[in-house]
Image (cartoon, grey):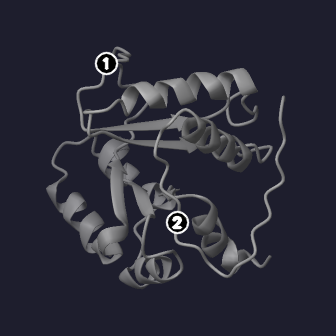
C-alpha cells in the first residue's frame, strides 16, 4: 500500500488516531483539511498533541501567542473530527499517579509493557487494560476513553490496539466503528504473545 494511503486505511480500522506530528511542528490549514478529507465522516476523531514549544520550551508560561499560533495553524479545520487534545509535559515535571478519574474522559498512551516502544502486550495485559476501560466507562459515567498504543518499534501497536478494542467490546463496552468503506481491509490476528 502506498504511504499516501496509510491514513485512509488506518482510519477504517481504528475509530481514532493520535496526531503526534503536531507536537513537533505547526502544520498548515491545507494539511489539516487533507487529513480530514481522508478519514470517515462518522465515528472517527483525531486526538491532537499540543506543541512541545508550548509545553517544553515555554513550560506553559507566557504561552498565549504560541497557543494562538497552534490553533491558527489549521487545527480547527478538522471540525467534528476534532477529539481530545494532549498536552504532554516534560519528564522533569513530577506528579503523583492516581487511578481515580475525575474528568469526563480518559486518555491513555501505552508504550510497551516490558521494553519502552518495543514490546507488545500479552493477552493477560490486554485483558487488564480492557477491564480498566470497562470500569472507566461504567453506566452513568458518561465518560469517553481514548487509548493509543505507541509501541511501534516492532510494529506491535496496531495489533495491540485491535486486540484491546475487541476485548473491550467482548466485555460490553460500546466501541464505535468508523464508517464502512469499499477499501478491502485484512488484519492478521496474533494471539498469545
Quarter of the image with the N terminus is bottom right
Residue 34 located left or right of residue 113: left
User: Nearer the viewer's eye, disc 1 or disc 2?
Assistant: 2
Q: Residue at x 61, y 75 (%)?
A: 8
State left or right for residue 191 relative to residue 173.
Answer: right
Q: Image check: 44 left or right of 66? A: right
**Residue 6 % position (x, y):** 68, 71
Res 75 visible: no
Residue under label 1: 100
Q: Work out whether mark 1 precedes mark 2 in sequence or the reverse, and give the earlier one.
A: 1
Q: What numbered label is drawn on residue 178?
A: 2
Q: Regarding mark 2 in the picture, which secondary structure is present there?
A: loop
Vertical side of 185 occupied by 52: above or below: above
Label 2 crowd (10 A; few <14 / some 14-19 / many >=20): some
Residue 22, given in percent of the width and then of the height, sits at 44, 61
| Label 1 neighbour load within 10 Å: few <14, some 14-19, many 20+ | few
Residue 160 can be seen in this image: yes
In front: 98, or 127?
127
- x, y (%) of residue 19? 48, 59
Task: Answer above or below: position of 73 versus 10.
Answer: below
The spot of residue 64 in percent (x, y) is 15, 56
Question: At 73% across and 75% down in the image, what residue appears?
Answer: 3
- Image quadrant containing the C terminus: top right
Residue visible at 27% across and 45% down in the picture: 58
- Vertical side of 163 occupied by 100: above or below: above
Amino acid at each position: 500500500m502506498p504511504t499516501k494511503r496509510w491514513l485512509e486505511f488506518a482510519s477504517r480500522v481504528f475509530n481514532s488516531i493520535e496526531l503526534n506530528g503536531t507536537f513537533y511542528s505547526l502544520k498548515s490549514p491545507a494539511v489539516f483539511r487533507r487529513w480530514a478529507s481522508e478519514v470517515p465522516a462518522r465515528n472517527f476523531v483525531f486526538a491532537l498533541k499540543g506543541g512541545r514549544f508550548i509545553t517544553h520550551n515555554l513550560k506553559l508560561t507566557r504561552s498565549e501567542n504560541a497557543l494562538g499560533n497552534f490553533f491558527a495553524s489549521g487545527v480547527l479545520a478538522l471540525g467534528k473530527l476534532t477529539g481530545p487534545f494532549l498536552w504532554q509535559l516534560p519528564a522533569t515535571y513530577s506528579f503523583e499517579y492516581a487511578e481515580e478519574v475525575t474528568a469526563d474522559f480518559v486518555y491513555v498512551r501505552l508504550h510497551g509493557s516490558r521494553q519502552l516502544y518495543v514490546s507488545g502486550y500479552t493477552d493477560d495485559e490486554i485483558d487488564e487494560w480492557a477491564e480498566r476501560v470497562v470500569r472507566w466507562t461504567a453506566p452513568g459515567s458518561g465518560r469517553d476513553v481514548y487509548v493509543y498504543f505507541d509501541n511501534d518499534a516492532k510494529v506491535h501497536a496496531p495489533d495491540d490496539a485491535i486486540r484491546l478494542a475487541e476485548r473491550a467490546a467482548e466485555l460490553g463496552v460500546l466501541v464505535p466503528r468508523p464508517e464502512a468503506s469499499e477499501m478491502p481491509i485484512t488484519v492478521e490476528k496474533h494471539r498469545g504473545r
